[in-house]
Each structure stands twice: as structure tokens, then as C-alpha cells.
Amino acid sequence: MPHVSRLNVKKLTFSAVLIISWTLGLTTSSAQAVPPLPKGEMTLRELADARGLLIGGAVAAGVLDPDEPDLANGVAREYNVIVTENAMKWVPLNNASGQFNFTLAEFMMNFAAKNKQKMRGHTLVWHEQLPRYMGAITDRAEMMAELKDHVQTVVKQFKGRIPIWDVVNEAVSDLPGSPMRETVFTKVIGPEFIEMAFRWAHEADPDAKLFYNDYNTDGINGKSDAVYELVKGLLAKGVPIHGVGFQAHVDINFSVEGSRMRENLERFKKLGLDVQLTEVDVIFRGDAPKAEKLERQAKVYADLMTACLAVKCSAFVMWGFTDLYSWRSTAYPLLFDDDYKPKPAYFALRDVLIKTPK
Ligand code: 9MR
């Protein structure tokens, strides 16, 4: 019953438990697999390679074990870039001030290297997945020292191996007027924590492309206006920021046109910044008719890719590979279903890549 065992695995919070069971040889092998494409058809990866686009997705370290060859094979076949879904966040890397643990992150780096994939680094500074010791700091100089140590130790660890970093994630609030989100960083350091993080990351690896990343900023709205002002201000101060990531966690009612997404991406490009879609998924809720919803989902995926290509985005990254292991696993968000069968959205993305002139 490989499917049942996968669903059970899904309920475990990934890494620790799975890695222990893997080490002890407790896992079973599975019979499902991403079906081969008809002869002569190109994968997403091949199509993206041909136009110099990064296409990829987040992968949770804990499920890339020998029990899930389907995931490993599928990700290797279809993606030329991966992101560690959690393994490069502050808690997994630096949960006890200054005692860094790169085991899981390096495991993912090996996977990427083995499959000749780039790694998109996610994420250096975020108010979530922050260790308790950070929340306890009240002294500005002390928090700056922790921030600098974290950013620089992590970036140096992967210097020359991770070409793109999400330096600051989700710093703008969802409140009306979209001020800065109140976090330990704004409370103790002030909003300057953002420019500090970018400058320290740049010092640690001058060749890495440094991104600000956020959600609900895909179209033109109050929040994307706030991000626009933020990054414009950073550029004016000479802060080394090279791009903006638009997460694109949307649903099947999202309209690329209605939200003026292309116009939004273009205004960031005009600032001289690179733009990437960084965490794409397109959800819908369970009831019938499912086929019709899968088609609407495919259309949203296609429209997102079309907008991305129209502005010469450099990456289209999804927040996973199979619905089975998505953070929104009950809402059918990704290109492959629980049984690793490609959904209409997969073919729709291929179609856009085939038909859009380079
Ligand atoms: O998918 C991630 C989930 O497994 C984690 O529990 C969660 C908290 O670390 O983060 C999720 O990924 C988030 C990403 O890092 C930032 N943008 C929103 C993503 C979905 O919540």
C-alpha cells in the first residue's frame, strides 16, 4: 500500500523522523512513478533550459529519502532549480545561537549537485521559524550581532554554490496601508534591519543575487505598492538588492489580467531589478466538478507563466512538486497529483513554454 504509507509519512513533520527511519531501514519502496513523456516530448526542464529560464520548486529534505524515488526522479527530470522548503531557515540552521548545523541543507545541496540543478537560497531573515533566543533579545547591538553572524555564516557556507538568496522574507505587513510588519527585528533594530541584512549578505558573497520576497504582492495593490517603495528606497541608498520575488500563492479565481500582474512586475523591472515567481501554487477546494477546476487551475498556471515570460522574469519556482507533500496538500495546488500523475496544469505550462517566442 505505497499510497497509504506516503499519506502517513505526510503527517509526520518531515526531516527528523524520516531520516531516523531511513537510517534504520524502516521504509518501504513505492511502485508509483512520474509516467514517462511520449517520445520526442520535452520536459519542463528541457523547455526552460532552452530559453535560459530557471524552473523549479521547493523540496522538503525529509521526503527526499529512498522511500520516495518518485519525488527525487520527478524533481530531477522536471526542475533545473530547487529550493529547500525549510532546511535553510533560521531554526534548522542556527537554533542555538552560533551553533550552526548544515547537515540537512548540505544533503539538499548534494541532491541539487547530483542532478545538475541550481539552488535558490530561502531564506536568511524571516520573522517565522526564528529560534527562541532571538525573541528574547532586547538589546539592539546584540540583535545586530546575531543577525550579522547568521547572515554571514550562512551565506559564506554556500559561497559560490548558491547564486540567489531570499535575503529578507515577508517584511511588509498585510494591514491596511501596508506598513512594515512589526517583528522582533523592527522592534529591537528598527526597519534598518533590512538594509543591514542585504549589505552583510553582499559582503559575504558579492556574486550572489540578493532578493526581497513576499506574498500577495503579485498584482498591483496596497501591499505591492509598499514593497515597491521599500525596494526603491533601498536602491536609492545604494543597498545591494538585485531582485524581488513574488510568491504567487493564489487560487483558481486569481486573474493575472484583473490583478494587473504584468504591469506590476514591469514596474519592478524598470527599477533595474530582476523579478522571479518564487512560490507558485494555485489552489481550489474539494467539491465537484473537479475536472473543470483542474482546467481553471491550468489556465491560471499558464497565465502566470505567460506574465513571467513577458517581463523576462528569470525564474518560475513552485512551492513543491506533488500535491501529496504540499503545505496546502488538501487543495490540489501543484502540477503533479498525489499519485505523481501530471495534471492539466503541467501540460498548460509546457504549452506556454513551447508556444511563447524566445
Ligand atoms: O511550506 C513551508 C512549511 O512547511 C513551513 O511549515 C512554513 C513555516 O516555516 O513555511 C512554509 O513555507 C513558507 C515560505 O517559507 C515563505 N512563504 C510562505 C510559505 C508557505 O507558508
Image (cartoon, grey):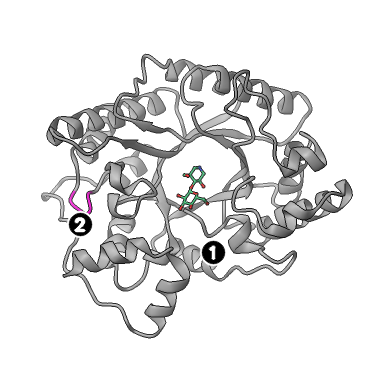
On the image, which quarter does residue 209 sit in? top right
Residue at image position (76%, 33%) is 191
Q: Is residue 293 magenta?
A: no
Q: Where is residue 49? Give x, y as percent.
A: 36, 44
On the image, which quarter does residue 33 sit in? bottom left
Which one is in front, 122 or 176?
A: 176
Q: Residues within 10 Å of mark 1 (few under 14, many from 20)?
A: many
Q: Is residue 205 above or below residue 248?
A: below
Q: Where is residue 83? Give x, y as percent.
A: 47, 52
Residue at image position (19%, 42%) is 343
Q: Is residue 129 above or below residue 6?
A: above
Q: Where is residue 65? Give x, y as percent.
A: 36, 71
Q: Which mark is residue 14?
A: none
Q: Which residue is mark 2?
A: 34
Does 338 sit left or right of 209 as displayed?
left
Q: Amino acid at mark 1?
A: Ala
Q: Which mark is residue 105?
A: 1
Q: Considering the numbered disc 2 on the image, is that residue within a helix, a strand or a loop?
A: loop
Q: Where is residue 10? Give x, y as percent.
A: 33, 61
Q: What are the residue bounds of the magenta stretch?
A: 337-341
Residue at image position (49%, 22%) is 265
